Every structure is written in C-alpha cells, then in structure tokens.
C-alpha cells in the first residue's frame, strides 16, 4: 500500500538541537545554585546520549548527572518543580540559537510535499517549543500538523502519539511512514503499525542506528528515492 503521509521527528532528525539543550540546561542549573563543576558535567556528550524521551526525563537525568546521584534520588525529585520552572523560562528565549538544521532536511521535506505527502512533526519536545523552533528554522510551512510531548497522554516510544497523529492526518498507520533517528522512534512506529525510515546522523542513545530495523537507513533526507520508498514509483 503506498504511503500517503509521513510523520517526522524533530530533535536529531531535522534539527541538531544539542547546543540548545546545553545552553538552556546550563542556565537552569545555575539558577538552582549549582557549582560550575557540576554544570560542566552536563555537556554535549552527555546530552547526546540522554535526549529523546521528553523534557522531564532529560531534566531529571541532567540533575542527577550534575549532582552525582541517580535519577530516582529524592533530592532530584524535590528539585524538579523549580528546575522545570527555570527550564521553561529559558527555553523560549534561547530556542534555536545554538541549533542548526541538518543538511538536506528542507530539500527532503520539499520533495515529499511535491509528491503530495501530508506531513506531521511529532516530537517529545513540548508542542509550543517545537512550533517555535520549526518557525525560526523556516520549516514550519512544510507541516500540516505539529504535535509535541504534551499533546497526548503518553510520549514516544508509546505508540499512542503516532496513532493520534495518523488520525489527525486522515491516514491509516499502514499508510504512514515514520521518519526518525532513534530506536525510540522505531519502537513507537512498529507498535503503532507504521513503517520507519531512520537517518544515520541523529541521537540514538550511543547505539548504532543501523542495528535498528527500518525500510532504509539514510545519510540525508534529500538523498532518499522517495517515490520508491513511498511506493509511488512506476
């Protein structure tokens, strides 16, 4: 069955946002009174292995990393409300300043639109931050729908966000292709009944993305033979 729609992940798939997370978390930890040595522990390498499961998970793990604790520690839980407050203060101001669109993304999205494919962005980032980032990077016009981690009762890798996004696009899960960068995306897609295409340059928690089954593993979105992948090739 030819694909009629595609759901595209944001962080690590369309935009390299690690720099944004580093800056926002540095400000957040400083507001909490963290020592510079503690703040320095939450660096790009750490975040690239941690990002992908939503703001709360990232912030909880970052606090634990800074303080040398486990994410389940009582001190971390107690600090979370204040940390979330500061995080949500800083993110809208800094969103997109230290991030870059991956090469070939805009061209790949344009190719999909020219083929008549409906597009939705589905991310675990809060919806308002996702829309703001897409707009600042010039990508928002490509999308019919944008949903973040706060749009539904559960986040990826639960299949619910993909199922609900397919409903919003008016396409069945079997007619919808998930495009992502991690096992998180693949797990959600498989459980929802979607096929998945994975980029090779994103954030997969330190594991080789080629080990995750997919219809294709691609180095750039503008180098995909979209008619063949979508089942539209003559």
Image (cartoon, rainbow, N blue to C red):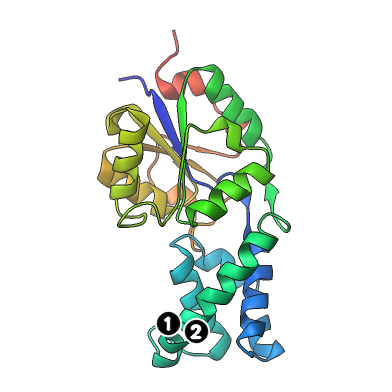
Above/below status of 234 relative to 228 = above
Measured along the vertical axis of the image, is residue 47 above or below residue 127?
A: below
Q: Residue at x 29, y 41 (%)?
A: 163
Q: Residue at x 27, y 43 (%)?
A: 192
Which SS class for mark 1? loop
Image location of residue 173, percent across then percent down:
29, 33
Q: Quadrant of the N terminus?
A: top left
Is residue 223 among what the camera can see?
no
Marks 2 and 1: in contact by CB < 8 Å? yes
Task: Answer few, some or many: residues within 10 Å of disc 1's Cα (few below 14, many 20 plus, some between 14 and 19).
Answer: some
Please tell me which residue lies in front, 142 or 233.
142
Number of residues whose C-alpha sits closer than 10 Å to that of mark 2, classed few (under 14), some (14–19) or many (20 or more): many
Answer with left or right where residue 30 lies relative to residue 176. Answer: right
Where residue 89 appears, x then y in whole percent? 61, 69
Measured Cα–Cα span from mark 1 to mark 2: 5 Å
The reply, left or right, for residue 189 in relation to residue 225 is left
Residue 59 in the image: state x and y as whole percent: 51, 74
**146, 178: nearer the viewer:** 146
Identified at 60% across, 30% down, the residue is 108
Above/below status of 10 relative to 174: below
State the image quarter where residue 214 is shown: top left
Q: Secondary structure at mark 2?
A: helix
- Between 125 and 225, the residue placed more toward the observer is 125
Any part of residue 140 in sight: yes
- Residue drawn at the location 56% of the way across and 18% of the way down: 114
**Where does label 1 land, which residue?**
71
Q: Which mark is residue 64?
A: 2
Q: 210 and 103: which one is in front?
A: 103
Q: Is residue 11 left or right of residue 119?
A: right
């Amino acid at each position: 069955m030819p694909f009629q729609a595609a759901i595209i992940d944001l962080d690590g798939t369309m935009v390299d946002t690690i720099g944004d997370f580093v800056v926002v978390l540095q400000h957040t930890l400083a507001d909490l009174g963290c020592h510079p040595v503690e703040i320095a522990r939450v660096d790009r390498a750490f975040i690239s292995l941690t990002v992908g499961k939503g703001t709360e998970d990232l912030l909880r793990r970052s606090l634990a990393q800074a303080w040398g604790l486990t994410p389940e520690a009582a001190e971390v839980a107690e600090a979370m409300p204040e940390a979330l407050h500061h995080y949500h203060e800083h993110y809208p101001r800094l969103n997109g300043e230290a991030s870059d669109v991956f090469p070939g993304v805009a061209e790949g999205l344009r190719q999909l639109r020219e083929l008549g494919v409906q597009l939705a962005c589905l991310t675990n980032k809060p919806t308002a931050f996702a829309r703001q980032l897409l707009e600042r990077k010039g990508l928002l016009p490509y999308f019919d729908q944008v949903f973040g981690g706060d749009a539904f009762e559960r986040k990826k890798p639960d299949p619910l966000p993909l199922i609900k996004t397919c409903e919003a696009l008016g396409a069945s899960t079997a007619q919808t292709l998930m495009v992502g960068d991690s096992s998180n995306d693949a797990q959600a897609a498989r459980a929802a009944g979607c096929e998945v295409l994975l980029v090779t340059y994103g954030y997969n928690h330190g594991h080789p993305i080629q080990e995750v089954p997919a219809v294709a593993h691609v180095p750039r979105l503008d180098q995909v033979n979209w008619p063949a992948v979508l089942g539209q090739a003559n």
